[in-house]
Amino acid sequence: MAKQIPIDNNIKTLRFLTGEMTQQELAEQLGVTRQTVAAIEQRKYSPSLEVAFKISKIFGKSLNEIFTYEES
Amino acid sequence: MLKDLTFSEKSAFIHITALSLLLIFTLATIWPFFSGFEESILVVKPLWVALVIFILIEIIGHSVVAARNNKEANADSDERERLIVLKSNYYSSHLLGFCLIGYLLISMIFQIPFLSIYFVFIIFVVAEIVNYASQLILFRRGV
């Protein structure tokens, strides 16, 4: 039933590598809910550019290193 | 299963329950009309009883859910939640508009001698159920 967006990401890995950051901690830094972070990680929601740039800034990586577009 | 739901999902669930009860009450009120007792529609049963029950379910349900999830209940909605609400409103408003205009057209074309408040009310309630059901689906399935 769950719909997957074509944009994959490695946020879960990056969280783990950044001091085992929790979804809640990342959500607070982004100004979104924990459910939204979970939805992004599970490819159920495509974040806005603003949130994507915030994620990139938090992990110190470029957008290309975090998000990849998978053509079906 | 209910423990897995977020505050917004529980809220949508309460709305659907309350609206479904309101719909059942309204359908039960107008049912005699379809059974051939046309005069019974003239006896306007008090919809306010159903409305009071509806409001009570909404208040009690949301109070209980908010008390158990006070952090989530006080938080502002984020971009994903706003998008879900926007999409759900889009679906329900189309249904509402389509059904109301359709009902008005059928009434005019077939010279139906009444424009019952009940029918308009039912269309409105169904549109709201669709709205909250869409929210629940989009929260679970993804948007």
Image: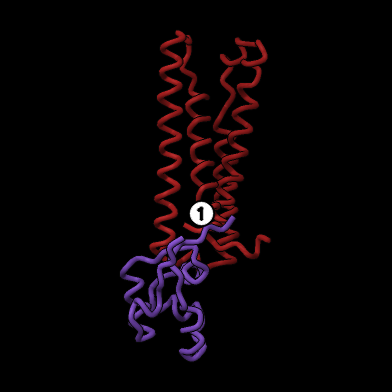
Q: Nearer the viewer, residue B29 or B128?
A: B128
Judging from the image, mark 1 belongs to the subunit labelled B
- In the shown orientation, is residue A47 left or right of residue B7? left
The residue positioned farthest toward the bottom in the image shown: A19
Query: Residue drawn 65% across and 26% down?
Result: B28
Q: Colour of chain A?
A: purple
Query: Residue drawn 47% across and 71% down?
Result: A37
x and y, in percent, of residue B140 in the image: 56, 58
- In the shown orientation, is residue A43 left or right of residue B90? right
Image label count: 1
Q: Nearer the viewer, residue B107 or B98?
A: B98
Residue placed under numbered mark 1 in the picture = B138
x and y, in percent, of residue B125 in the image: 52, 36
Query: Residue drawn 37% across and 83% down?
Result: A58
Q: Colour of chain B?
A: red
Which amino acid, by three-letter code, is at mark 1? Leu
